[in-house]
Amino acid sequence: ELFRERAADVADVKTGLLADLLGKQVVDLSSLPENSIVVVEELTPSMTADIDKENVAGIVTETGGRTSHSAIIARALEIPAVLSVADATKNIKSGEMVIVDGTLGKVINNPEDDVLEAYRAKAKSYAEEKAALEAYRGKETVTGDGEKVLLVANIGNPDDANVAAEHDAEGVGLFRSEFLFMDAKELPTEDEQFAAYQKVALRMKDEPVIIRTLDVGGDKEIPYLNLKKEENPFMGFRAVRYCPNNPEQYKVQLTALLRASAFGDVKIMLPLVTTLDEVRQAKALVEECKKDLDERGVAYNKDIEVGTMIETPAASLIADDLAEECDFFSIGTNDLIGYTMCADRGNDRVSYLYTVYQPAVLRSLKRIIESGREKGIMVGMCGEAAADPLLIPVLLSFGLNEFSVSAPSILRTRKIISEWTKEEADALTEKVMKLKTATEVKVMLQAAQK
């Protein structure tokens, strides 16, 4: 245990030595001066996990896209970020004044005084708009004609549940459990995982808490799992493919989730599903864990719901079959768009393809939601598109039950939902679904924005 605790110290020494030898400056992102702008080539999930929220005023990177994990975390932290800025680390010097416009995706270094003043006025206006949204705090999330929908938050660690509650979330639609594993030096024990899940369940009281099982692989590396390097890790041995092939390890997480279900409305969600067999295998392991807990005399919710994250074209195409096996769906648009359009969400050269307004993506969303509703199961969305003000009327028309967004987006999303009746949303969506290109779709949705 002592040597394990010292591992991080050895890594810091290594980083410091390499930096000296290469003539690089090492910056500790957990301790920065006030109003710092972080400019990096790439911001990894582990770096954003350590970032000093109080003192970071903005983030600029040379790689990544709007739905990369770093961008998602930056939004959750309410830090303006602009990604895929070519040669940012060369053109922006340490100590310079920089404006980061996260709304328009602009970065201005060494701005003129009039530009600086204009942006200070914009910041003030933004703060006033945010204050006006407080009128929606404590209110139910309903459409303009009174139809209730669920508005919940995406979180990455147990402490984020406090942030979700502070922003008036009606539950948790996505708890990304992999960050528990990424922040650890070895596989978290059953008790360690249980404590994390229980903390969220207790904080959210009787409100739903959907916890995604370990989604490892792709750009989320966990060294102690010793995953083999793959040529295309995003389509490789990851997520629900990895877990059932390591059943004893997976059962530790499932058992911890079951134990936590005794303290709140905890639900289990399976990531990256492409076949019905994957769901059945996972559910069989859940049943094994239930028997083990029965033998141990440990309480849990015997009717715990097990659902699927719909984020692959395969899952979309067999959504009707999956709906018979699952207790709920949650659409992960971030990956669904990428896989459907064969476009890497972090690659700015194909970013014109990576948009939820693509007719192929919209048709996929419609099919998924209708398949779930026909079987009587809850259908939610936990991708970034759930908070897209342009898309919200279309999702309401399709029949989406649950919107899971970053905590800071809760009140704004509630406001937009309240502005649309089902009749208005249906009329707009009927026109949108006849369009042939993403550009046409976006233009029509922009024109209809309230």
Image: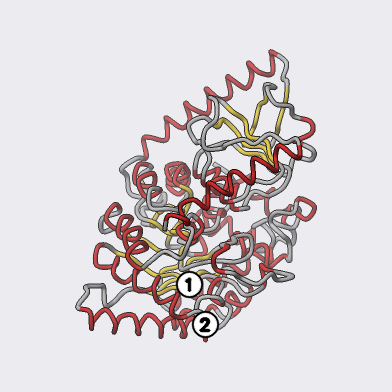
Q: Is residue 318 above or below residue 192?
A: below
Label 2: which secondary element: helix
The answer to whether marks 1 and 2 mark residues whose Cβ atoms lie closer than 8 Å is: yes
Given residues 236 and 166, the one toward you in this image is 236
Q: Position of residue 65 (x, y in %)?
A: 68, 49
The tag on residue 278 is 2
Q: Quadrant of the C terminus?
A: top right
Residue visible at 46% across and 68% down in the picture: 213
The tag on residue 270 is 1
| Amino acid carrying mark 1 in the image | Leu
| Amino acid carrying mark 2 in the image | Glu
Q: Residue furthest left?
A: 297
Q: Is residue 396 visible?
A: no
Where residue 41 sits, quadrant-wise, is top right
Tell me which numbered mark, 1 or 2, is placed earlier along the sequence.
1
Q: Residue furthest top?
A: 113
Q: Is residue 212 visible?
A: yes
Density class for disc 2 (Cα within 10 Å; few <14, some 14-19, many ≥20) is some
- Count up the numbered dots: 2
Given residues 182 and 321, the one toward you in this image is 182
Left or right: 190, with 6 as reference point: left
